Amino acid sequence: MRVSCVVNGEPRHADDVWEGESLLYVLRERLGLPGSKNACEQGECGSCSVYLDGVLVCACLVLAGQAEGAEVVTVEGLAAGDTLHPIQEAFVEAGAVQCGFCTPGLVVAAHDLLARNPSPTDPEIREALAGNLCRCTGYEKILAAVHLAAGRGPAGNPREGSR
Amino acid sequence: MTTPVAPARQPFAPTAPVTGGVGESPRRPDGALKVKGEFAYSSDLWAEGMLWGATVRSPHPRARIGSVETAEALAMAGVLAVLTAADVPGRKTYGLEIPDQPVLAWEDVRYQGEPVALVAADHPETARRAAALVAVDYQVLDPLVDPEAAMAPGAPPLHPKGNVLRHIRIRHGAEDTAAEVVVRGDYEVGMQDQAFLGPESGLAVPDGEGGVDLYVSTQWLHVDRDQLAASLDLPPERVRITLAGVGGAFGAREDLSMQIHACLLALRTGRPVKVLYSREESFFGHVHRHPARLHYEHGASSDGRLVYVKARIVLDGGAYASSSTAVCSNAACFAVGPYQVPNATIDCTVVYTDNPPCGAMRGFGAVQTCFAYETQMDRLAAELGIDPVELRLRNAMAPGSRLPTGQAVEGAAPVAELLERIRAMPLPEERPAGPPDLRSLPGGVSNVTHGEGVRRGVGHAVGFKNVGYSEGFDDYSTARVRLSVVAGEPQVEVHTAAAEVGQGLVTVQAQIARTELGVGRVVVLPADTQVGSAGSSSASRQTWMTGGAVKAACEAVRSRVLELAAAKLGRPAAELALRDGAVVAGDAPGPAGAAEIDLTDSAGAVLVSLADLLAGEVVEETREYHHRRTSALDPETGQGEAHVAFAFAAHRAVVDVDTELGLVKVVEIATAQDVGKAINPQAVEGQIEGGIAQGLGLAVMEEIQVVDGQVRNPSFTDYLIPTVLDMPPVRLDVLELGHPDSPYGLRGIGEPPTISSTPAIVAAIRAATGRPLTRVPVRPEHIVGVPAPESEARPDPEPEGG
C-alpha cells in the first residue's frame, strides 16, 4: 500500500508498504528518518516518541496506515537547521547524553512536557518522562537538562521553536 | 520519492570544534548529532541493495539436532540464502576465552535461543517468516539447570572437559581459626541483564574480492575481527570492522552476537546484509550477569576485628564459557571486600549448565560477592552490637593492605574515608506531616498508601574491584596522533580502535590531545581496525589505557615538533613548550619541563606559531600503552600479583518501604568514590549516577526469570529496569586522590557505582523491615507475609506514622 503523510512539515509518501509495518519502520527504513529509535518496539521504552497530529505517541505502536494523512513530527524536525532547539541544547550542555539511544525519545517527550508546562517541578518532570527508559545516565542529568531548558524562559519554550 | 536516504556509511567522526582539556567538561563532540537524531547507530545503517538477516533459534535449552531442512525457506519469494553450520567455512566455534560456542549449532543445542540457521531476505518480515519455515528436527533432552547438580560427581557432561569451567582456590593465612563471634549466611544473586537500549545490529558489506567490511556496535573491534577471521576462514586484514554508533554496552557487547552471521550471509549473497535483533531476540543474543549462590562464614573478635572469612561461591556460567573464567577470578579475589582479613579460605566455582550463557556485566564478579560480604558485615555488626559503619571502619583496608591473594594495594585505599564521608552527609528530610504527595511514596500515584505502613530505613555499603584486565594478560592500547595545518590552523587527528559506548571516550581523547599539544582543534577519527588494537571498553580500563596511548602518542608528536622548533629557533627543545597553537618559551627547562608546563598559563612568549613552523609538514606518531605487568594466580593457593589497580566506592541508601505491600521507594543514594583524577568531571558524574541506577535495578527489580532453562520475561514489559520514577536523587562526593601508576593519576570509574549500591539499598530495606533479605533482587513477597522458617528475622521495629 501507499502511505502519505506530512513529516516535519514536508509531504512524504512511502510505496509498497506492507500492512504490518509500523510508523516507526516506515520512518526509519522508508523515509530515511532513523532518528526515532527502536529499543523495544512494544511501547515500553519511549525511544521512538514522535508527535502524531500533535499528540505524543510511540511510533512503534502506530501502524503505518494509521498515519495516513496525518502530520508527524520527529526528533529530526525540532532543530532549525544547524541551530539546536533549546531543549536539544540543554541535553548536550547538561551531560544528559551518553550513548544517546534514548535521547531522541526523551527530547521529544521533554518538548511535549515544556509545551504543556513551561516550568515543571521535579515530580512533574519525572511523571512526564516515566515512559522513557535510559540505561546510561541514571536520569539525574536528564532532569537537569529539562530544568535548564525551562529556566531559559521564552527561548526555551517549544512554542517558539520550529515545531 | 520513497528512496531511503539513511546513511550507508556515516562513520563515527565527531568533528565539531570543541574546547577543553584534561579536568574540564567540554561538550561531547557527538552530542549535537545525538540530540538531533542524526547519529548513526548500528541499527540505523542502510546500503543500496541491502538484505535483512534473521536467525533461527532453538526453542529448547537442551536437545540433539537430527536434521535441519532449509528447502522450504529457501523457496520463499524474497529469500536469498539459508545457511547452517555446514556453511561456516572456518572455525565452527568462537569465544572470548575458550572457543566453545558454535557459530551455528550442529549436533547439540545447550541453551534456549541458541542459533541454528540463518536467513537473508529482502524484507525483515520475509526473513522472519522464512526463518520460521526452517525445519529443525530436535531430540529434546532434560536440561541441566542447577549449577550445584551440574558440578556434582556423575552429572552428565555438557562439554567434553566436564561441567566445571573454573575453580579458584584462595588460601590466605591459617585455615583452622577460631573466633569469638561467628556469623554465617547463604546468599543468592539473580540473573541480571545489561539491557542496553540499542539492540544488537550491524551491516556487513562484501568487498567483491572475498573480504568483508562490517559496521557494528561492539566493545573491542580487534577481538571481534580475530574471531570473525577464524570462522570466515579469511586473513584478518580482509575483515575490516568500523565501529558504528553504540547504544550502550555494559559488558553485553564483549561477546559476538550477529557479527559472524551477518558476514556469512553477505559473503554468500554478495550483497550488504543488515542484522537487527528485536528486544526479545536481544535477551537471547547476549550473555548476562552470572547468577550466584554464596555461602559465607565470618569470624571476628568481640571488639569487632575480622579474624577470618570463609566463602564458597558457585556461579552459573550457563551454556558457554564467554568470560566466565575471568568473572570467577574476580568473584574470588574480591570475595572478602575491602577489608583487612588475616585468614581467608575462598572457593569459587563457575560451571556449565543449560541456562543462558553468562559473562561480562558491569562489576564483573565483584557485584555478586559484594552483596554477600556486605550483608555479612551488617549481620556481624548486629551480632556484636556495633554500628555497621563503625564495624567497617575498624576493618577497612588501608594503603599497603593485602588482598587474600597476597597482593598489596598500591596508592590510595580510601575505604575509611569514603565511609566517613557518606556517613557525614546530611540525610534527606523526613516525610512531611499532613497530606502526602503520592508521588513521593512507595507505589506512587497507584495510590496504595497515604503513609500508613511506610517505614524508612538507611543502609551503608562499600566495595571495590580491579581496574583493567588481570592475571598476567599483557593488555595494551594503540593510538595514532597526527598534527598538521589545515586551512591555516593547526589540527590534531586522533585515531584509535577504542569503542565509544556512551561513556564519553571520544570527548576524553580530544581533551588529552588538547592538553598535551596545546591545539584546540582535535578530530577523533572513526574507530576501526585500520589502527592497532585498543583493547576492550570494559573493566573500567579504557580512559586509562587508550587515554594513556593517546597521551603517549601526543608526547611523541610534541617531542618532534619541539625538535623542529629548536632547530628553527636555535634554542634547546627542553626550553620550549606548546600552547594555544604555538611554540612558546618554556619556563621550567629540564628533561620533563615541557610536559609539566601548565598549558593554561598565559605566561610564555609566543616564539613561532605551529602554522608557520609546520607549513605543509605533517607530524604523525603511533604509540602503544601497556600497563605494568601482572601475574597469574597460583592454582593451589590463589596467591599472586594478579591485578593492575583497584577502585573503591561507598554508598548510603535511604528507602521508604510499604511494609504491608512490600513496595520500595528509594528516597536517596549518597555516594563517595575516589576517581583518582576526574579527566571530565561531568562524565564522571554521569558514570556514577548511571552505575547506581543499575545497582538499584539489581536490588529491587531486575532479574531474568529462567525456569527449566526457559527465559520467561524477555521483554521490557516483563524485565523491568529503573525509570525516572524509580531512580532517586544522588548525592555525590567525588574524590581525586590520584594513582601512582596511571595517566594523570586517574582510576577507572565505571564499575564501582554498580557494586556497593545494591547492598546499601538492601541494607536500608532490612533496616526498615527487619527481614533478612538474603537474595537480590528483593521482591515484595520477601518483605510481606510470614518470614521463611530458616530466616533469622530480627524483631520488627516500632511502627511509625499511621
Image (cartoon, coloured by chain):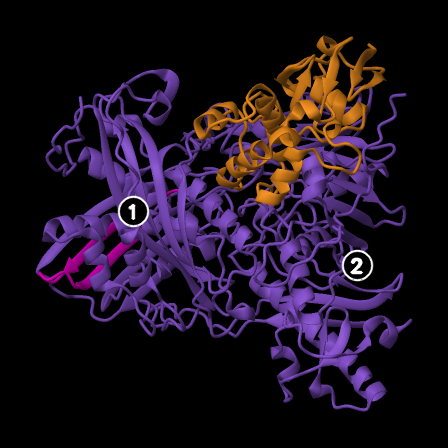
Chain colours: A orange, B purple
Callout 2: chain: B
Seen in the picture, residue B468 relative to A86 is either above or below; the reply is below
Q: State the residue in front, B78 or A133.
A: A133
Q: State the residue in front, B409 or B387.
A: B387
Q: Residue at x 43, y 27 (%)?
A: A123
Of helix, strand and loop, which one carries label 2? helix
Quadrant of the image occupied by residue B344: bottom left
Q: State the residue in front, B734 or B135.
A: B734
Would residue B321 appear left or right of B21 to someone viewing this image? left
Q: Position of residue B696 (x, y in %)?
A: 39, 39
Seen in the picture, residue B629 relative to B384 is either above or below; the reply is below
Q: Which residue lies under the disc numbered 1?
A: B426
Q: Distance between the Cα atoms at labels 1 and 2?
A: 57 Å
Residue B360 in view (yes/no): no
Would residue B2 appear left or right of B396 to someone viewing this image? right
Q: What amino acid is found at the position of numbered circle 1 in the picture?
A: Pro
Part of the protein shown in magenta? B291-314
Identify the disc placed on residue B565.
none
Q: Residues within 10 Å of mark 2 (few under 14, many from 20)?
A: some
Q: Residues within 10 Å of mark 1 (few under 14, many from 20)?
A: few
Q: Which residue lies under the disc numbered 2?
A: B237
Q: Position of residue B163 (x, y in %)?
A: 42, 48
Q: What amino acid is found at the position of numbered circle 2 in the picture?
A: Glu
Q: Residue at x 35, y 59 (%)?
A: B334
Q: Is residue B332 magenta?
A: no
Callout 1: chain: B
